[in-house]
Image (tube, rainbow, N blue to C red):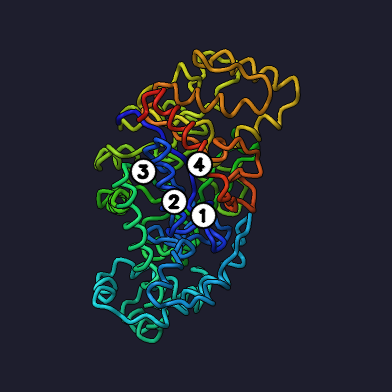
Amino acid sequence: MKKSSGILMPVFALPGKYGIGTFGKESYDFIDFLAQSGQRVWQMLPLSQTVYGDSPYQTTADCSFNPYFCDLDELFSLGLLTKKELKNASSKVSKIDYGKLYFERTALLKKAFSRFDYSDEFLTFVNSKKYRDYAIFMTAKDRFGSLSDFPAWLKTLNKRLIDKFIDENSQDFLFYNFTQFILERQFFRLKKYANDKGIKLFGDLPLYVALDSADVWKNKSQFLLDDDYKPSLVAGVPPDYFSQDGQLWGNPIYDYDQMKKDGFKWWKNRLKRSLERYDILRIDHFRGLDRFWAIPFGESAKSGEWTKAYGEEILLSVNKKRLVAEDLGVIDDGVINLLKNTGLPGMKVLLFAFDGNPDNPYLPKNIPSQSVAYVGTHDNDTARGFVNGLNDEQFASFKNSVNSVLPVGVKKVRGRKCVAPALIETALSTSANLVILSFADLLNLDNEYRINTPSTVGNWTVRFKQNHFPNDLCKSLKSLAKKYGRI
């Protein structure tokens, strides 16, 4: 990969008119901002439809696009929404209100669908069955609730009764196809616009899927589940930097022995589909492809144990050129060897670098070219938020450590507000082929703009404002990109 830099910006955080960022004007404006700033990559968080909790890492269907990201202005231009309906949907909130969206956005999209004339293109899309499982699953959730409450014939995938169910609920089934038809068109149009501007889209693939998902419903044999879809083991991580109690995610665990029988077909198809969407793809919680933390169902995260996975066999059988490993957390020799054997670039986070250890792998001098460097990720404090949480003694030590690694010519850090700009320039100066900067760090914002705090609720609500995209930021970013050979 040629040296370049980019920005981490969740679609939901873009400053749109309708309560959450969409694939509409705000996305195109952001691509223009990236191009004008000399940036070459837009890193997104997962784009799939979310389940309870609103985390993009818990999705109702891995293949889906989140209906909240639908560009409502396009629906208006197609005659599917009225000006009054657009006005009523307008909500310039500083934080995303998912409860409101849940009740109002789906209803609005159903109103748009009620005015939609089925085109040949749409019928071909439905008949392709690309989103058939998603549409059946969502229709079934409307009728029965969560997967655990599905009737036996649906859990056992009785084809005759499922076909009958689709016939009896054809409007709902077609509605869910409609949302994906519109969203897929909008996304790939946006991707073409980005690529034409020299911008690559950097996607994110959660390692696991949600228990209450179309993926689990249709592929029960690929997971450690009983006949009623109850898991024996669930996913999480042991105590680490992010949580002293560990994290209990609750996702079902893969049955790797079963997957191996057909050559990991499910995983290969999943990676292939994701790489069709994105120019670069990050595998979240990559260490889980070496060994994963398996927690007995109903117990705490601390009760888990490490269990062997088959990541090397999976990854060596697919095209790895555009994959990135999220190799943070508990990293041991197994993960290091998996990275080495697969050749995937890992991640280096500067906020983890300053612990006094000269061999710390996150120190600028230790960052190899085959890596993606960050000041912080979506799971970290913002740089400003991090230093604001330090007492005077801790900040003095941190400041001295940062000052000892600054590139030549960069002003020494004196106060807390100087840290984010200093770390940004330090990251850009490293050997890493790709540097991704958090938008909140570029604006030197505090933890009010932190995207996610692991093991807590109420995340994923950040929204940036229109005035957060000033021309002088464009100019300074482009100047830095030129200075460090990233254009």
Q: Marks 1 and 3: which is nearer the front?
A: 1
Q: Which amino acid type corresponds to the residue marked 2 in the rendered image?
A: Asp
Q: Is residue 354 above or below residue 12?
A: above
Q: CA distance from mark 1 to mark 2?
A: 14 Å
Q: Which amino acid type corresponds to the residue marked 1 in the rendered image?
A: Phe
Look at the numbered disc 4 and give the secondary structure of its residue: strand
Q: Is residue 350 left or right of residue 163?
A: right
Q: Marks 1 and 2: which is nearer the front?
A: 2
Look at the numbered disc 1 and give the secondary structure of its residue: helix
Q: CA distance from mark 1 to mark 3?
A: 19 Å
Q: Marks 4 and 3: which is nearer the front?
A: 3
Q: In this view of the protein, which residue sits in the foreground, 285 or 259?
A: 285
Q: In this view of the protein, which residue sits in the foreground, 483 or 235?
A: 483
Going from N to C along the chain, the mark reached first, 4 or 3, is 3
Q: Residue furthest front?
A: 471
Q: Which residue is mark 1?
A: 12
User: Which image quarter holds the C terminus?
Assistant: top left
Q: Which residue is mark 3?
A: 281
Residue at 56%, 72% in the rendered image: 87
Which mark is on residue 29? 2
Picture coordinates of residue 399 (x, y %)? 64, 19
Q: In this view of the protein, which residue sits in the foreground, 311 or 270?
A: 270
Picture coordinates of residue 139 (x, y %)? 44, 76
Categorize mark 2 by other alpha carbons within 10 Å: few (<14), some (14-19), many (20+).
Answer: some
Q: Is residue 413 left or right of residue 344?
A: right
Q: Which amino acid type corresponds to the residue marked 4 in the rendered image?
A: Trp
